[in-house]
Image: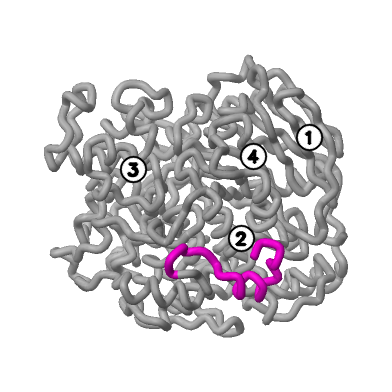
Amino acid sequence: MHGFMGRLLSVDLTSGHISTVPLNERWARQFVGGAGLACRYLYDRIDRDTDPLGPENPLLFMTGPLVGTMAPMCGRYVVCARSPQTGLWGEAHSGGRFGPHLRFAGYDGVLFTGKAPHPVYLSMWNGEAKLHDARGLWGKDSYQTQDAIKNELDMGQLSVACIGVAGENLVKCAAVMNDWGRAAARTGMGAVMGSKNLKAIAAGGEFRVSVADGATLKKAVRAVIEDVKEDVKAQFIAAGGTASAIDTTMWWGDVPNKYFTVGLWEPVSALGGGTMAETILVGNRACYGCPVGCGRVTSITGEHATENIDGPEYETAIAFGSLMLCDDLPGAAYAGHLCNTYGLDTISCGATIAFAHYLYDLGIISKADTGGLELKWGDIETAFTLIEQIAHREGFGAVLAEGSRYLGRMYGVEDLAVQVNGLEVPFHDPRAFVGMALVYATSPRGACHNQADMYLVDLGAAVPELDIEFGDRLESSEEKALMTSRVMDWRSLYNSLIMCHFCNPVAGFTLSMFNAVTGWQLEASDLLPLGERAFQLKRLFNGKLGLTAANDRLPKLLLQPLPDNEVDTRVPDMDVLLPAFYRVRGWDPQTGMPMPDKLRELGLDDLA
């Protein structure tokens, strides 16, 4: 089967038994790969009784058909399980080189079940797999772990995905780290690894992906690379990294400040890509097969002097910057480095720390709660302390390690926590781009900006071949619901292929690469239904776990206008947006689940 290695590795950690499972080709045709195919594999294995941190929760690392081919910007993988952070569908993506190396080892993915009796790591090389004793690695950080495994195995070009101490300590926002700073960060997949005593996976080898039409693929790849060179967004990111978005979107009201309670805060410009280039930037870094190279390499001086830090990216700069009213870019870079070292999601970690500052400011918590720490806006040193405490589950950090929703519940103010279904909201304010309100409220993994980047679409990043058009960014309407659903389906397909969201060539070029690799001979009209099928499957998955229409909501703070917002004071009208979105999706307004007719339309009759 072109585009696939044709098999998964299955590892029973309890017994140590390792076996090979043939790829389900029918499912691959339905769900492509990546997160969509992973959901189909896990759908029948997880139910309401599955403890996210129990041995019964399966953990699946998955790639997609374009990963490891010459298709640019496809050097990615996804990790999926029931999330300990949300209790719902867990999905975390990462770039770097681990995804391609997993395929070069001879597999499309690896499924872990059970729990090892002591810490272990898995090596995969040229179709052979082995579990190794990792007791000597337990307690090491993500960088130390990768170096130690590569030195121990000495197998040539290996890539390692691992957890740091946060995953070992089952911190709810623990990330899976790979390739020195790349992170599968969201929904706590690092904690699932830790719960299984699985420290790391090392992968590599000489297998290569079979493609149906190499000549056509080369032609399509050349077209995509030329298109990316002309793409303003891609070149903007190449020049300044993702943090360069701060320099522009702050003027749209997109950048949140002081825990989503302040509108335009001009000092935030000190966190942007321009400042970074002038001060701490020393280089850039690209993932496998990427012509853009958005990753930043920075070095900082002073008390926390550190060389060759990965980042900070946009989300990290905001998490430890404007969200805490801090304009210290080197400080934000170091905070991000600490998170990468310990294996923490910078979005959830930073947002939870900022929420604690907000509650402290309101007088809801005090030094008696924080272990004597004074939480002052703009104090990055306290953030460093809290990151350490969170990773080790010490002091007040043991509370924050459970996340914003838990912190709010603990003090009777859950409604003030800016989260959806337990996942902290990323740093694109839906009051600036109302399409993001629907994305956050209905994303299968909780608040997630990577389910659909409506903030870019409504700034002009239309996809006319798929009838995705930009509109009034502040308009709550039927049309906005329709466009948002289409963008979500498009990005759902990206998350199945798996492609980086910064790669946005003409849709026809993406289709050409897809067909050239797989030989499936799809039409443009097939693309969005493929994405929707995966999206709707995740909705059904969450329904099995207890999600209902009542879960589709935005947090209180995001439905309040910002009084000092110089851009606009409108807020998303969810009473208009949600019913319209439900109609487009074919969801039952009472249950929130896809209705049988919609499932049959998508060829999911067996789940109707």
Q: Secondary structure at mark 1?
A: strand
Instruction: Specify which label sits upstream in the sequence, 3 or 2.
Output: 3
Alpha-carbon distance for marks 2 and 1? 30 Å
Front one among 523 and 590: 590
Quarter of image, res 489? bottom right
The residue type indicated by label 2 comes to Leu
Instruction: Specify which label sits upstream in the sequence, 4 or 2.
Output: 4
Q: What residue is pinned by disc 2? A: 537
Magenta extent: 589-608
Q: What residue is pinned by disc 3? A: 405
Q: Residue at x 34, y 33 (%)?
A: 400
Which one is closest to the eye, mark 1 or mark 4?
4
Q: Secondary structure at mark 2?
A: helix
Quarter of image, res 31? bottom right
Q: Residue at x 33, y 30 (%)?
A: 399
User: In the image, 584: left or right of 504?
Assistant: left
Q: Residues within 10 Å of mark 4 (few under 14, many from 20)?
A: many
